[in-house]
Image (spheres, rainbow, N blue to C red):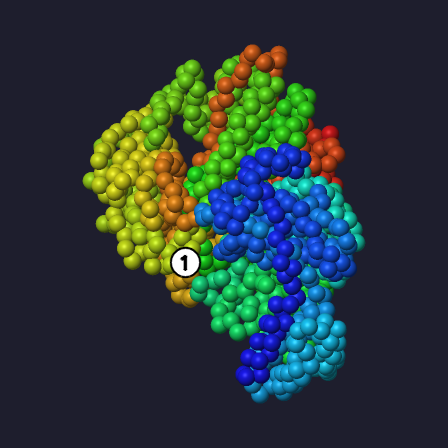
């Protein structure tokens, strides 16, 4: 240990001489500027800027500041390498450095600057009289003030730097080797001899440099030593993880992208062996718009292979909450962007930081030509370690893809956590191999390195470390500095050749952590659901308008709306784990989307112009009946009362054709008097009978068809409960398993009244108070329905409180089915294993279902994503109220709907009911002022005649003529299905999710006959 202490001491003294201060501070002037003044600042005269002093105070959240000055190296440094160093009160907390800077020299972007990248090159060889105009833009996000800012000049000595790393890197290996490892003592003995060769005496530069050369020659023996011949190999690729929004806004992320890419490009100029990968299309697209000069340099390096483009998604989204069609668009638009912009076909889903992974992903990948999936996030599990790192991942439809879990961590780590943004040193390379759980299967592993979350990326130090490990150091895995794709091609080839050697993981990759992200910032999740549905409607109407009225398909306008949806599905926006300003921006995004959606819908309706003033829209592929809300001027059958206090008329429509827009007077209205019973604490019809207790909770629900009592006797249902929600680590992210240790009944019922008596439905209104909050529910039962609905309005003013509603089920079931994208998964309700216990909060899309053979109870929702199921008790998670990183998260008004549906074990019926609650039949007002000649009813574009097969999307093809129709099997069984084309199309092809690889299908009697495997997605391309 004394030798290591000596070496650490002397090497630290040597490191101090790599950048030698010249005692020159650049005189700077300063101005603050808003984010939209950037172009003006670059061209303006700085005469009016303020001088920067030692006591200069600046900086605030979401602020931008500019510092400019002229650097003039002294004459005695002619011929030497000169750098500037940023002097600032850098903070470095949770993935961010504050401030972060973009440095321009003589008007050209040089690199980014932050706590990890302080030095920037002015000249590799200074000349007499040379000067440099320096302009630095500094962005701040923390709520603290900066004291002082400066740029100092330093001489950068490459000889010292080379010698330092030649000695430092082997030392960092040796300190990790066992005391009795002969390689440790060989390295330390050699380094001790090398360090003793360095003459630290001042005053004679020539003597000092000669001693450095001697030390390097001695240390070379380490790199020449023969180690174990077949030792592990770690492929290392530079990268930076940039959260599109998190503790900063999207507009700041655009700057982070510029800074990070500028730094990567600057390092490429100095290190020809440097390889860097980036993936997120949205940020590359922003860079192209904001900094075309940087983007052009990236494109040039992509051509040479030094800058690698990989990762097929538009950005790194949440993949539990985002809907199925949205995930398809992330892939479709991501692949098309990389192909059209860089000539690259990405083959990977790169999601290192997303909070769990839907079992729908393998099929989406397989049907898009994507062959590999990479993450590290499952190493954050709080209960179980994933048993393998290289495996086949099998989705709900049976598709399999190669999955790889990054194993990088410090060598001496006692945890299972790994990282995707290490400050790469030997400890990370050695730790990558040590953490790998399948060492018997092969010697080659992969890692990415570089500061991340808030960007920044690799540093000179990391690149110098890699160069030494590439040369080979006894006791350390061999490093290959290169692109990532060749590694994964070798891995895929190996796994496909020997599949029996590698395990298969079936189903979802559930993250045992960050469970609260299924619920945090509820308004954002509701906007997401509504926006996904709005786009489905718009694309369907756009196809109708083009087919029936020759209205040009507005592809660019629709794509702009998809861009809003995809942006706000980023894995710190949609999960609710960002600062408040991010959600202010998101609110504006969604408001713009809904405004444009309304405008487009109005255009389509005016173009299609069904005869009459009102039209009924059905965007599903099946004939439907149901209650529809009516515009105020349309005669209605009864008034519907909403939980938020609003009212609307309603009619009941029957047999509305699929994919159609028809006049209201053509639609059939039901006029029969089906039984409805409404009493102060009772709702009933021919199919179910519901009673309520004195606190407004359900006392009983009886299925009249079977006689089953749905809930456990004596236990209330729709039991609203508040739980203490104070997670130990990540407030907005986590629900800890101890949340049940303290709970509070919400039973302070302040009013209960009958608000609807029929003939279409009956309803009771309940209002509760809890602490500072108010909860209102209108509980309704339609005539002839086997489904009880809860329209809910909440004015929420609690913090660190979790709100759930519970249902104690009187069924014997060991599992619950929960909808995910394009299917459902089955999860245990028991706690037999540690894996079961860890799933105490799970994800859903529009429904969960529990039951016995031939009988079931489904819970439907219009904007919720979290639930828990234990011992046959179901609880829907309605709200959270964390305070970090947004102190006011979830404060204020919320609207949501859920329903309890009794059924006969028919999953297809559950799916259809979930579609209906999310996409009810709509009666739309047609603007007659802009209408053309009345067109009457629009013929259905097509119809799906097979139960269990549903329509997901209808749109125009991305390229060429034709229309895309996406269908999928909803129940998990094989089906033969028929699709009627309504005389609309002459040819049909099966295509993949990229709308490629066409396979012709015969049209027989205007019908397509298709075969679906369980949960299979089939995409059709239809043409005239």
Side of 783 where 945 appears, left or right: right
Residue marked by disc 1: 729
The residue shown at (47%, 66%) is: 384
How many numbered discs sit on the rendered protein?
1
Side of 360 where 338 appears, left or right: right
Near-viewer residue (669 or 68): 68
Near-viewer residue (1006 or 523): 523
Q: Where is residue 428 in the image (x, y as percent from the top left)?
A: 59, 69
Q: Helix or strand or loop: what does disc 1 sit on?
A: loop
Residue 205 found in image quarter? bottom right
Residue 497 found in image quarter? bottom right
The residue shown at (54%, 31%) is: 593
Q: Is residue 886 visible?
A: yes
Near-viewer residue (119 or 602): 119
Q: Where is residue 224 in the image (x, y as percent from the top left)?
A: 74, 80
Label 1: how many residues lie within 10 Å, few (<14), some (14-19) or many (20+)? few
Q: Where is residue 516 in the image (x, y as percent from the top left)?
A: 42, 51
Q: Is residue 853 visible?
A: no
Side of 90 where 159 appears, left or right: right
Q: Say above or below: 142 vs 523.
A: below
The residue shown at (31%, 51%) is: 723
The residue shown at (26%, 35%) is: 767
Assign the N terminus to one quadrant of the image: bottom right
Side of 328 where 627 appears, left or right: left
């Amino acid at each position: 240990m004394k030798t290591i202490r000596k070496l650490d001491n002397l090497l630290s003294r040597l490191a101090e001489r790599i950048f030698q201060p010249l005692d020159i501070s650049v005189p700077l002037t300063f101005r603050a500027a808003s984010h939209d003044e950037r172009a003006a600042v670059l061209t303006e005269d700085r005469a009016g800027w303020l001088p920067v002093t030692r006591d200069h105070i600046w900086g605030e959240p979401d602020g931008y500041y500019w510092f400019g000055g002229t650097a003039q190296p002294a004459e005695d440094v002619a011929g030497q390498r000169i750098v500037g160093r940023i002097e600032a009160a850098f903070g470095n907390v949770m993935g961010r450095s504050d401030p972060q800077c973009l440095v321009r020299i003589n008007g050209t972007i040089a690199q980014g600057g932050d706590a990890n990248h302080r030095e920037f090159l002015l000249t590799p060889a200074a000349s007499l009289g040379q000067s440099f105009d320096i302009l630095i833009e500094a962005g701040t996000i923390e709520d603290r003030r900066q004291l002082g800012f400066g740029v100092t000049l330093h001489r950068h000595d490459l000889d010292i730097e080379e010698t330092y790393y030649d000695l430092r890197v082997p030392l960092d290996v040796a300190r990790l080797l066992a005391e009795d490892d002969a390689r440790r003592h060989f390295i330390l003995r050699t380094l001790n001899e090398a360090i003793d060769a360095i003459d630290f005496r001042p005053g004679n530069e020539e003597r000092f440099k000669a001693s450095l050369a001697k030390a390097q020659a001695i240390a070379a023996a380490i790199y020449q030593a023969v180690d174990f011949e077949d030792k592990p190999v770690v492929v290392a690729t530079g990268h930076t993880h940039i959260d599109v929004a998190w503790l900063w806004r999207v507009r700041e992320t655009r700057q982070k992208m510029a800074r990070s890419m500028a730094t990567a490009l600057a390092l490429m100029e100095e290190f020809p062996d440097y390889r860097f990968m980036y993936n997120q299309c949205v940020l590359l697209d922003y860079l192209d718009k904001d900094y075309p000069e940087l983007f052009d340099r990236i494109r040039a390096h992509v051509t040479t292979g030094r800058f690698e483009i990989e990762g097929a998604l538009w950005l790194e989204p949440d993949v539990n909450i985002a809907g199925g069609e949205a995930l398809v668009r992330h892939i479709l638009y991501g692949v098309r962007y990389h192909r059209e912009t860089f000539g690259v076909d990405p083959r990977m889903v790169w999601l290192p930081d997303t909070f769990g992974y839907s079992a729908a992903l393998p099929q989406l990948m397989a049907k898009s030509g994507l062959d590999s999936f990479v993450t590290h996030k499952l190493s954050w599990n709080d209960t179980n370690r994933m048993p393998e790192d290289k495996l086949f991942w099998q989705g709900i439809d049976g598709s399999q893809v190669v999955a790889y879990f990054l194993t990088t961590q410090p060598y001496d780590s006692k945890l299972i956590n790994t990282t995707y943004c290490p400050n790469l040193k030997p400890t990370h390379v050695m730790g990558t191999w040590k953490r790998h759980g399948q060492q018997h299967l092969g010697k080659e592993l992969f890692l990415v390195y570089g500061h991340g979350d808030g960007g920044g990326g690799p540093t000179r130090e990391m690149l110098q470390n890699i160069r030494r490990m590439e040369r080979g150091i006894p006791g350390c895995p061999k490093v290959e500095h290169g692109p990532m794709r060749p590694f994964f091609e070798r891995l895929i080839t190996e796994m496909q050749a020997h599949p029996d050697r590698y395990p298969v993981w079936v189903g979802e990759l559930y993250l045992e952590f960050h469970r609260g992200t299924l619920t945090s910032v509820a308004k954002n999740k509701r906007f997401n659901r509504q926006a996904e549905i709005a786009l489905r409607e718009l694309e369907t109407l756009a196809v109708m308008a083009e087919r029936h009225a020759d209205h040009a398909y507005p592809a660019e306008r629709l794509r702009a709306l998809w861009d809003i949806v995809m942006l706000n599905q980023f894995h710190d926006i949609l999960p609710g784990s960002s600062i408040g300003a991010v959600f202010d921006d998101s609110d504006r995004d969604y408001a713009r989307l809904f405004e444009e959606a309304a405008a487009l819908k109005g255009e389509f309706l005016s173009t299609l112009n069904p005869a009459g003033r009102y039209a009924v829209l059905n965007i599903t592929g099946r004939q439907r009946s149901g209650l529809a809300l009516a515009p105020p001027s349309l005669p209605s059958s009864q008034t519907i009362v909403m939980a938020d206090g609003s009212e609307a008329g309603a009619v009941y429509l029957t047999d509305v054709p699929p994919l159609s827009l028809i006049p209201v007077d053509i639609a059939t209205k039901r006029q029969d008097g089906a039984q409805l019973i409404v009493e102060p604490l009772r709702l009933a019809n021919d199919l179910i009978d519901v009673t309520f207790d004195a606190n407004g909770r359900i006392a009983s629900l009886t299925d009249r068809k079977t006689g089953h009592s749905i809930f456990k006797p004596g236990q209330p249902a729709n039991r609203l409960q508040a739980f203490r929600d104070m997670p130990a680590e990540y407030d907005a992210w986590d629900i800890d398993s101890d949340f049940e240790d303290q709970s509070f009944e919400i039973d302070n019922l302040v009013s209960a009244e009958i608000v609807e008596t029929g003939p279409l439905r009956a309803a009771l209104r309940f209002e509760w108070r809890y602490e500072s909050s108010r909860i209102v529910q209108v509980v309704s039962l339609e005539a002839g329905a086997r489904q009880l609905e809860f329209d809910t309005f909440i004015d929420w003013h609690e913090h660190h409180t979790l709100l759930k509603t519970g249902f104690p089920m009187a069924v014997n079931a060991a599992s619950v089915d929960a909808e995910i994208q394009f299917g459902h998964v089955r999860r245990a309700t028991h706690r037999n294993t540690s894996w079961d216990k860890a799933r105490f909060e799970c994800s859903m899309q529009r429904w969960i279902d529990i039951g016995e053979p031939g009988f079931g109870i489904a819970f439907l929702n219009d904007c919720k994503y979290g639930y828990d199921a234990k011992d046959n008790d179901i609880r829907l998670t309605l709200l959270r109220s964390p305070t970090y990183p947004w102190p006011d998260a979830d404060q204020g008004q919320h609207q949501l709907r859920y329903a309890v549906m009794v059924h006969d074990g028919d999953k297809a019926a559950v799916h259809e009911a979930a579609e209906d609650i999310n996409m009810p039949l709509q009666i739309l007002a047609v603007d007659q002022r802009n209408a053309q000649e009345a067109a009457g009813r629009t013929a259905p574009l097509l119809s799906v005649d097979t139960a269990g097969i549903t329509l997901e999307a209808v749109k125009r093809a991305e390229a060429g003529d034709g229309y895309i129709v996406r269908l999928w099997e909803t129940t998990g069984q094989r089906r033969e299905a028929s699709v009627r084309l309504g005389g609309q199309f002459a040819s049909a092809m099966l295509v993949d999710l990229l709308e490629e690889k066409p396979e012709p299908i015969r049209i027989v009697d205007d019908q397509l006959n298709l075969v679906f495997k369980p949960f299979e997605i089939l995409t059709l391309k239809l043409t005239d």
